[in-house]
Image (cartoon, rainbow, N blue to C red):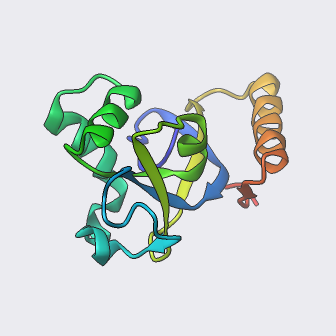
Amino acid sequence: MFAPYDPGGIDADVVAVEPRVAALPADHALAGASRVRLADLGIGLEEVDERAERDIGEHGVQDLAQLLALVGLGATMTLLPRSVAARYPRQAVAYVRVEDCPPASLVIVWPERSRSRAVAALVRAAVAVAESRGMVAAVEASG
């Protein structure tokens, strides 16, 4: 999952850190830009982490695919991690790099009291996959 998240009852390690992009309607004035700034989008720094969740709640959508459909219709714009944008290409949606946006942190979580070797192996595997996909690996919480 991506941070921020409710840490109650879980442990987590950051798997990767990656840039965010703006998801804009394809006919938006900034859709053809190579990069934009948060101010260009009318988004404050304090809104970044919860923008997609707010948009989902505000429009009553159930998932990311529905949110992107609303973006394509021009009803909203949102911020997403670059890897999420890569998995959800849409003709009606343009993804534009946001140069002053803090990066998104991808985390792997597990039950707080778990000491499983299998979980440790899964965390190592998740880091390896993130690195193989060009995501910037972060320092593990224990190191």
- Determine whether, in the image, residue 127 is placed left or right of residue 10: right
Tell me where residue 47 sits by quadrant.
Answer: bottom left
From this viewpoint, which residue is outermost toward the front? 27
Residue 118 falls in which quadrant of the image?
Answer: top right
Viewport quadrant of the C terminus: bottom right
Q: Give the answer, above or below, for where 107 lies relative to 31.
A: above
Q: Return the residue nearer the eye: 33 or 5.
A: 33
Is residue 131 toward the left or the right of residue 10 in the image?
right
Rendered position, 11 above or below 61: below
Q: Is residue 97 left or right of residue 25?
A: right
Residue 34 coordinates in the image, percent (x, y): 53, 70
- Residue at 31% across, 65% down: 29
Residue at 29% x, 77% y is: 39
The quarter of the picture where residue 136 lies is bottom right
Height in image: 140 above or below 116?
below
Examine the rendered structure and indicate whether residue 108 appears above or below residue 13.
above
Residue found 57% across the figure and 52% down from its top: 82
Query: x, y (%) of residue 4?
Result: 42, 50
Disc tally is 0
Q: In x, y percent, where is residue 114?
A: 65, 26
Closer-to-camera residue (64/130): 64
- Residue 13: percent from left, percent from top: 64, 46
Identify the residue at horizontal 36%, vertical 66% (top origin): 30
98 or 136, which is in the foreground? Answer: 98
- Horizontally, residue 61 falls left or right of residue 134, namely left
